[in-house]
Image: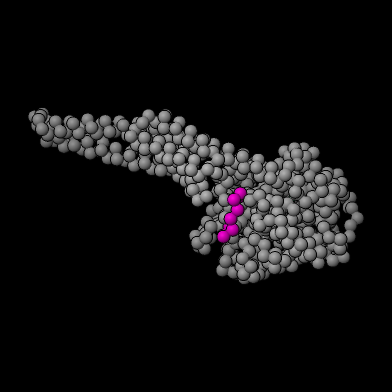
Amino acid sequence: MNTDTLHSRVAALQRVTDEFSRALPLSRLRDAISTVIRARVPGIDWPALRIGDLEVAIPIVQGGMGVGISLSRLASAVAERGGIGVIAANAIGLIEKDYYRDGRAANIRALRREIRTARRNTDGVIGVNIMVAVNDFHELLDVAIEERVDLVFMGAGLPIKGLPVERIREAGIKVVPIVSSRRATEMIFRMWKKIYDDVPDAVVVEGPLAGGHLGFSVEQVDDPAFRLEEIVPDVVEAVRAFEDEMERAIPVIAGGGIYTGEDIAAILDAGASGVQMGTRFVATAECDADEKFKRAYVECTEADIGLIDSPVGMPGRAIRNDFIRSAEAGRRPAFRCAWQCLASCKADAARYCISIALNNARIGKIDKGFVFAGANAYRVDKIVSVDHLMETLGGEYREAATDAVVRRLGDRLNVVEGLRRRFSDARSLAAKLEREYGDAITTRIRHAGDAGIDHIRDLYDSALSSVRALQLQIAETLADAWSLLSPEVSATAEN
Ligand SMILES: Cc1cc2nc3c(=O)[nH]c(=O)nc-3n(C[C@H](O)[C@H](O)[C@H](O)COP(=O)(O)O)c2cc1C
């Protein structure tokens, strides 16, 4: 970004504002400001995502995708490109040969190795996603602490009791719960405050269009009241109280159905500070799943994507296939439970082992399992590199964000135009009354009398206060218009 060009264009905008104050025709002013904004499109760039002292240039978190879908390759590619890369810890040991002999040990070994590989591949920001519902939650968390990852995302349950918060803090790790409601957010933050005198560093709010397990009932999934754009402002409001209390920012990261840069611009507008995306990252060359897993996204239709009743005890969003239909019809594939990996799973009653089914899909045996996918997976038409995806999203974001700024500036300028007309009228009236008052005093027109003079003076005073009030409103509206630009202006000015 050429800071000099930006500064010269900001100076041009300043000149336009100065011209306004000398009452130029406003249509010219509006056109001039629009031209300035459009001309410096590259200046409207990703807003950085800050979580405590961590900062990434691109406010995109690659969602953790368990059972080997997001490992070090995907996570380090995303981190290297300026987002947050996340290794999913649950059932990660399935990438090891001895998972069925000792699942816990395989999980620990694989997670440690993947974190170290990611660290070797990039200096970017790396997180680990751990499901609260897994039986080895604490062992996996210990590995994340020992390896000093940057963040731990905790989903599929409420991360409240028994957390080693002191050790997490000593290791400089940020904690980010994944929630689906304001209620869950408030419960986690309130309990953390009470138990640990601390609160999480950020929160991911995941809406019903996400891939994988969902924090909603089947009925809620299609209920408009639970749409991501409805929940985000609620969660933002809920964390605000804790931000005030703790005197630190708690960014809200929104996920589930975010597909384009335009979607990102819209949800940031609704109050989010970043997004979490899964589906788009599955369809990348760097995603750690087999090619057939990724092809399933390219080949599926909208009608193929639906819900499953997962043995985890939550609905999940997946590409529905014969494996799922057969399980729903009561046919149970033979399987051996390796080690009761999920706290809530009743292996004897389960229709299938979800870890085995997801792992089969990961290694390309799609018909012996199924593919988790977000509601927008049918829009994927090719597999691209992470670099290409980030570039595309960046271009779309910039365009949408620039359009939004130009639109809002136009709105403000329309308001200014209306105010200016009233200002002009009020000023003429005041000038006329001033003249009349002057005449009345100097010529002492007999029929005006003192009462008449007082009346003219009252009218003049009132016209003058209208002029002042309108001046103030115009100044406020202009300041508001300028503030639309200030985040970008100050962000680029710092570079
Ligand atoms: C294949 C797949 C596996 C996933 N596995 C997990 C997981 O293990 N833990 C988790 O918290 N979220 C998981 N998710 C959810 C993602 O982290 C992310 O929040 C979600 O995909 C966002 O919605 P999107 O797919 O519409 O972008 C998974 C999603 C997908 C598509």
Q: Position of residue 116 (x, y in %)?
A: 73, 61
Q: Residue at x 20, y 38 (%)?
A: 458
Position of 211 relative to 104 (above/below) = above
Q: Is residue 338 left or right of residue 71?
A: right
Q: Tell me the residue at 65%/55% (across/down).
A: 124
Viewer-side residue, 120 vs 75: 120
The location of residue 143, given as percent across then percent down, is 72, 66
Span highlighted in magenta in the image: 51-59
| Residue 280 appears anywhere in the view | yes
* Residue occupying the point 55% across, 40% down: 42
- The quarter holding residue 261 reads top right
User: The N terminus is located in which quarter?
Assistant: top right
Q: Position of residue 147 (x, y in %)?
A: 70, 65
Instruction: Tell me if residue 14 comes above or below residue 108 in the rendering.
Output: above
Residue 58 within the segment the image draws in magenta: yes
Specify the quadrant of the image occupied by residue 171. Answer: bottom right
